[in-house]
Image (tube, coloured by chain):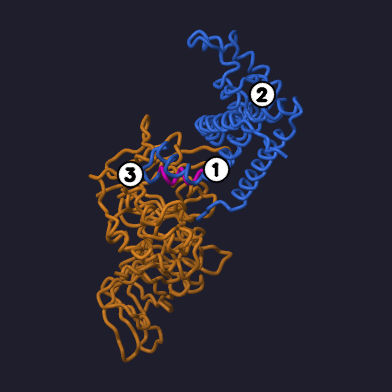
């Protein structure tokens, strides 16, 4: 499997970056963290815009930086997309798209203008000038221009931050499609939990220039340690499910999660498609006994207690890590914990009071 | 009143001088202005001051030192005389040399501010798309700086056309070789031929005015920007 290995040490008077990463060079990896955590510096080091005095970087078997080695940015097979599109105002859309393509060795051109323009829906814009385009269109052109250099890595630095909600929703499917169709690994920086849930496979959480946590979205969102980074109200579980069937009579869609069934309001998604759902830890309650017949809670999963969190005697709640085929975090009261007397390894029923659908738009084909 | 005959030669000579000087200035001013934008060297201020010097120096001072420099015993004139048989003072080449120095700030400054306003990102973007720095300079920076180039050309041309003191000191007043418009005007006034002096002067005045109108209208239009 292709890997992205990177190790950078940067010491500025006011800021230090000291990271070591070992990531799968596929899918979307997000670098997540508050401003000033070093996200942009990390991207600049990865792309070669900045030369970390002490650094190592290797992608898909190629060393881009090591002692005595520093491949300059123009020779790295890398695509960069920023918050601003940075299109060249003096060139037409087509010439913008082809700028990097023409500077890529013919033998290394894996993608052609036609297919990129089609995937990003740019065909009608080719003759136009950048200033005539909307923000969302410009950003799509910027993505296309980066892709047409046939990069080994696509780096996106808050590419949607300057767009309004509707335009964001318009672009996310395109990014997902690129990843599906062209298999270009993407390193993505964002502040937005929403973008993370919709796009990301692997998360790297940075704090004050150091890697605080790293893992799959499922792991990170159910990990107590991520509380500060993703926000208390986001913590809980992210589950990858498959659409099983639609229940027209009750207006429900049944989802399969590792052999167990979840119910959500009727979704307009074909059977067999994947759907990511997001659950807050405070919407999860636990019971030891088989659930009573008479409950209004539709979604009950069988799970096992993994770990009982540290009990903070001043607080009233405690985090329980569960395994239901995927990690789930439950936040219950200390009183409930005392009543249930939970122990690691103990089987348990997980009642899920609310499920949020993440509109994963891989289906936008 | 008889239409006074004017000698076209000084006009033609002025245009030639200004044209050649502008071409040299663009070639010379581009790397200087780019270096000033990019460098973090502490010599930057020294170079900036040197480039701006002709703005504040009396033309006679510049002319005096150029005369010494370009003359047959000068550091530049001497070797040139040894090679070609004639020194640079009192020659067209000498005038081009002098005009280039004299008009340098009028070309470097607009280019410098054009490059500054472009910022770092277009260069970084072009490099990330596989362009070398030189390639990116010509394919992205130069087109983006085109208003700066236009301003630099117009100002450099007009300023060269209007110079007097330096030309007089370095070039003298040799018809067909170094006698440019401004000196011709001075000559006409000396011999009390006000009519001819008027025609040339009003021509230069109108030309300069039009040039400045052009420069300000170039600069008024906002620079192209796409975020």
Letter of the orange chain: A
What shade has chain B been given?
Answer: blue
Nearest the viewer among B199 and A64 is B199
**Label 3, label 2: how far apart the Cα atoms are:** 48 Å
- Which tag is nearer the camera, tag 1 or tag 2? 2
Please state which of the two labelled residues, at mark 3 or mark 1, is closer to the viewer: 1
Residue A205 visible in the snapshot: no
Give the quadrant of residue B69.
Answer: top right
Is residue B126 in the magenta section?
A: yes
User: Which mark is on residue B166?
Assistant: 2
Q: Picture coordinates of residue A248 (x, y %)?
A: 31, 89
Q: Name the residue furthest bottom.
A: A249
Q: Is residue B92 visible?
A: yes
For this rendering, which residue is in front, A4 or A296? Answer: A4
Residue B111 in the image: x percent, y percent? 56, 39
Q: Position of residue A90 (x, y in %)?
A: 45, 51
- Which of the 4 quarters of the picture holds residue A19? top left
Query: Which residue position is annotated with label 3?
Result: A103
Q: Which chain's residue wears label 2? A: B
Say what secondary structure mark 1 lies in: helix
Q: Nearer the viewer, mark 3 or mark 2?
A: 2
Secondary structure beneath label 2: helix
Q: Residues within 10 Å of mark 1 (few under 14, many from 20)?
A: some
Above/below status of B87 relative to B40: above
Dot 3 lies on which element? loop
Q: Which residues are magenta?
A: B120-127
Q: Are labels 3 and 1 assigned to the same chain?
A: no
Identify the mark nearer the N-term, 1 or 2. Answer: 1
Residues flagged by tags 1 and 2 on a common chain: yes
The dot on residue B150 is: 1
Where's the C terminus of chain A, which quadrant? Answer: bottom left
Chief secondary structure of the magenta portion: helix
């Amino acid at each position: 499997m292709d890997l992205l290995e990177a190790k950078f040490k940067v010491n500025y008077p006011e800021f230090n970056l000291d990271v070591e990463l070992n990531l799968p060079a596929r899918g979307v990896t997000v670098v997540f963290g508050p401003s000033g955590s070093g996200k942009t510096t990390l991207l600049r080091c990865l792309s070669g815009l900045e030369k970390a005095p002490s650094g190592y970087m290797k992608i898909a078997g190629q060393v881009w930086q090591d002692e005595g080695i520093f491949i300059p940015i123009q020779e790295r097979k890398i695509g960069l997309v920023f918050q601003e599109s940075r299109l060249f105002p003096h060139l037409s859309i087509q010439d913008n798209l082809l700028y990097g393509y023409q500077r890529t060795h013919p033998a290394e051109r894996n993608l052609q203008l036609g297919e990129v323009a089609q995937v990003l829906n740019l065909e009608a814009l080719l003759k136009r000038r950048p200033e005539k385009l909307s923000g969302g269109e410009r950003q799509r052109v910027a993505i296309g221009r980066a892709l047409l250099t046939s990069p080994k890595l696509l780096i996106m630095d808050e590419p949607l931050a300057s767009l309004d909600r509707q335009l964001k929703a318009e672009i996310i499917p395109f990014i997902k499609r690129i990843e599906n169709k062209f298999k270009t690994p993407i390193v993505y920086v964002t502040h937005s939990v929403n973008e993370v849930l919709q796009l990301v496979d692997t998360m790297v959480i940075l704090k004050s220039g150091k890697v605080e946590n790293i893992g799959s979205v499922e792991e990170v969102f159910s990990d107590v340690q991520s509380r500060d980074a993703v926000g208390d109200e986001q913590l809980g579980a992210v589950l990858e499910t498959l659409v099983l069937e639609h229940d027209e009579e009750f207006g429900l869609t049944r989802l399969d999660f590792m052999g167990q069934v979840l119910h959500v309001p009727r979704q307009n998604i074909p059977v067999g498609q994947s759907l990511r759902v997001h659950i807050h830890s405070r919407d999860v309650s636990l019971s030891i006994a088989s659930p009573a017949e008479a409950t209004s809670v539709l979604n009950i999963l069988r799970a096992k207690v993994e770990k009982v969190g540290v009990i903070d005697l001043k607080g009233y709640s405690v985090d329980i890590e569960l395994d239901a085929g995927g990690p789930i975090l439950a936040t219950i009261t200390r009183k409930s914990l005392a009543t249930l007397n939970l122990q690691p390894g103990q089987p348990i029923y997980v009642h899920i009071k609310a499920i949020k659908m993440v509109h994963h738009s891989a289906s936008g084909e | 009143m008889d239409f006074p005959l004017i000698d076209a030669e000084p006009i033609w000579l002025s245009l030639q001088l200004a044209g050649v000087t502008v071409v040299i200035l663009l070639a010379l001013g581009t790397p200087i202005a780019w270096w000033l934008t990019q460098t973090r060297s502490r010599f930057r201020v020294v170079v900036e001051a040197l480039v701006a010097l002709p703005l504040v120096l009396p033309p006679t001072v510049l002319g005096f030192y150029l005369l010494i420099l370009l003359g047959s015993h000068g550091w530049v004139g001497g070797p040139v005389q040894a090679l070609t048989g004639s020194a640079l003072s009192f020659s067209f080449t000498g005038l081009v040399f002098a005009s280039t120095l004299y008009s340098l700030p009028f070309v470097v400054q607009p280019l410098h501010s054009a490059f500054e306003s472009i910022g770092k990102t277009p260069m970084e973007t072009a490099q990330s798309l596989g362009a070398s720095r030189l390639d990116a300079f010509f394919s992205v920076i130069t087109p983006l700086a085109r208003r700066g180039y236009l301003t630099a050309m117009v100002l450099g041309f007009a300023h060269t056309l209007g110079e007097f003191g330096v030309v007089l000191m370095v070039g003298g007043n040799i018809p067909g070789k170094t006698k440019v418009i401004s000196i011709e005007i001075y000559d006409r006034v000396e011999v009390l031929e006000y009519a001819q002096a008027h025609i040339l002067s009003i021509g230069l005045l109108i030309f300069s005015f039009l040039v400045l109108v052009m420069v300000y209208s170039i600069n008024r239009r906002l620079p192209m920007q796409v975020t």
